Image (cartoon, rainbow, N blue to C red):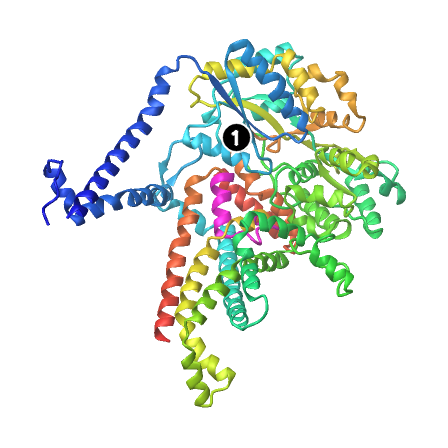
Amino acid sequence: MAMPAKSKATRRDFLKLAAAGAAGVAAGPWVSRNAQAKPVSITFARESAYVKKFDEHFQKVMAPAYEKATGIKIEYQIQAAGGSAPVQLVAMVENKAGADVAWTQQEWLYRDALVDVSDIAEAVGKEQGGWYDEIKRYSMDKGKWKSVPMGNIGQLMNYRKDWFDEVGVKKFPETWDEFLEAGIKLKAKGHPFGMSMGHGFADNYSWLYPLLWSYGVTVMDKDGKKVALDTSETAKAVDYVRKLYKEACIEDCVGWLDPANNKAFLTSQISCTNNAYSIMVSAKRDLPEMGKVIDHGLNPKGPNGQRYHALVPVTHGVFTYSKDVQAAKDFLRWTMDPKQYRPWIASGDMYFAPYLHGFDKVPEWDIEPRVKPFQKVLETGKITSWPAPANRQHGEVVNRWIVIDMFSKACTGTPTKAAIAEAVAQLKTIYG
Amino acid sequence: MAPAHRPYRLGRLGALMERESVFSWLMLTPPVLFLLAFLGYPFFYGVYLSFYRREVASVASFVGLGNFVTLSNDPIFWQAVRNTIIFTGVATVLKASGGLAMALVMNQNFRMKAVTRAMLLLPFIVPTVLSTVAWQWILDPGMGLFNRLLVVSGLANPGPSWLGTPTMAMISIIMVNTWRGLPFFGISILAGLQTIPVDLHESATIDGAGTWGRFRYVTLPSLLPVIFIVTVFSIVITFFDFQLVYVLTGGGPANSTHLMATYAYSLSMGAGQLGLGSAVALSMVPVLGLLLVGLTLYVRKD
């Protein structure tokens, strides 16, 4: 009868082992927490940069330099591009764990979880020619800076100069009406426009919001209290977009997500779209012939005679849950010192354009004449909430595509009045 | 046999441990705790959240059924409900009928049968996100496989915009879901087919039944339990489908492919309204419950 005894021993051993294991797991973090007097590392999370040299510069030059100077290791956490970074940030904020410093995408959703960095932002502004005013709408909340602006991802009209020339449009259209006219001619030649209107981010709003503004319409009033969208001018803008879609665009663009317009442009399916200059970079690298004939045009002017662009801000913030907020802030301040900041910006080929007037005349802007127009985006650019505050409600409007869908509904068969009414009803619910 | 020497002193705890009922529960505890932690906790936290106005990084305030009232007045929510029902209904019917056909064909003897069977499982094995990205290319209007084939064969020029109009986008996501789910039906039904005794078919043949007769009165009734189980599973999985739509359309154009799962995600993670998002997610539970009860009753009656 040896069997039961043996089986008992195994059970006991197993339980002992399990208990020891559990104790080990529990003791681990406790021991390491106590042993830690000053932070040995700071985690810095950023979405992977389109210009690869930019991330490399940080990893190979900046992070080692900081470790050498302070003994603090920087863990550079590169998040995948394509829309998942804001979700990760929201998860970090909710779990009160994760990066100490981050590219705070969509910070309007979680400003309460960011520490006041006014001291840094003000010092940097003073040091480098002052901030462009509009970025304060995004980075500041109730008079305090909640993030330090790092740069703007400029969005402009990317177009095929060769095809525009072929139909006799030698200069990029100045007004939306001329833009439509050019589009009709190009579509007839088999080169339609591809203006994103789907459930993506940036490529859709970077032309639809400026278009709306240039019709003299804003979504909300200045205080962000009253819905201002319900006007006859909005109807004209919606009718214009429907006409542009039907007569000048590729049918697919109404459902496009972020990468779709890049893909369509690079495969010669479209002659114009609104995008950052990433299309040109890809073309120069992989399709040299096309790389030569791509150019960038400013958003056309509207009936009110004005030209607008939408800012896509890149800002850095420090989370309140960070174990050592001061150490994280010191690091952030260090990155914004001109000694570090200027080479860093240069390594990104101005893909991230600083919101600082100190950069207005730097030679870095001349690396490529087709990059230079992106500087104009800073001058005429607005945060999408403009003129209202860029608050949580605005974040909801952007992320639920309320304004974008007003246009895309109109393009897919909803009458203008109904499309506007539906958007207005959603806005009223969101802004309460 | 002489009792084995026992080096242990059996204390009260030890004696308790000897009892199978106690020991088995002890062994069961870890998985139960695991389930509670990773399934139970999120579920009940979701239920809790749905009664609160809870925005990211802020304090929750109790609103009772407020979130559900908000949703009941939200046309996008109702559109998502409608879309989810159409998507699940059509895709399930297609998968069930296609899967049955696939199984009947696979049950025949032909060369390379084993290889073909293995290949058919591929759509099910490849991670959804990956295969969906491939579908994005296949459905591309100008250079996608479908439209190239249509243009080259002269059937259409240009081909349709697969993801660019509300109707086509819905058709496309149903098509991709069907493609992915078909092998699950096919293989499960095939397994069921192989359990039907050959004698049943033989005696039916002797009684004068033709191919259709044998299918109608022997094969189908024997398969019904399998089809039922697989369908129920499939409805659940399809109803909660998220990845496919998220990758392919993001719920667009103009919300025409927004499912309840993608809408819940867009409200919670996009708009930061965790309470409202949870309310959408929770609304799926009773709808699904009703659907399953109805289906069960229907099959029982049969």
The amino acid on which the numbered mark 1 sits, given as a three-letter code, is Trp
Q: Which sits in the foreground, B141 or A302? A: B141
How far across and how far down the image is residue B69, in percent? 41, 49
In this rendering, position of residue A233 left or right of residue B226:
right
Tell me where residue A103 sits by quadrant.
top right
Q: Which sits in the foreground, A195 or A345? A: A345
Q: Is residue B254 magenta?
A: yes
Tell me where residue A388 sits by quadrant.
top right
How far across and how far down the image is residue A221, in percent? 58, 33
**Position of B50 relative to A61 (above/below):** below
How far across and how far down the image is residue A308, in percent? 71, 32
Q: Is residue B55 magenta?
A: no
How far across and how far down the image is residue A271, in percent? 79, 44
Q: Residue at x 44, y 81 (%)?
A: B201
Q: Secondary structure at mark 1?
A: helix
**Image mark 1: chain:** A
**Position of A421 relative to A336 (above/below):** below
What is the span of residues highlighted in magenta in the rendered image? B250-270
In this rendering, position of residue B222 left or right of residue A283:
left
The residue identified by callout 1 is A108
Q: Residue at x 36, y 64 (%)?
A: B293
> Does residue A421 show up?
no
Callout 1 environment at 10 Å: few (<14), some (14 to 19), or many (20+)?
Answer: many
Tell me where residue B172 sits by quadrant.
bottom right
> Does residue B31 show up?
yes
In this rendering, position of residue B2 left or right of residue A158:
left
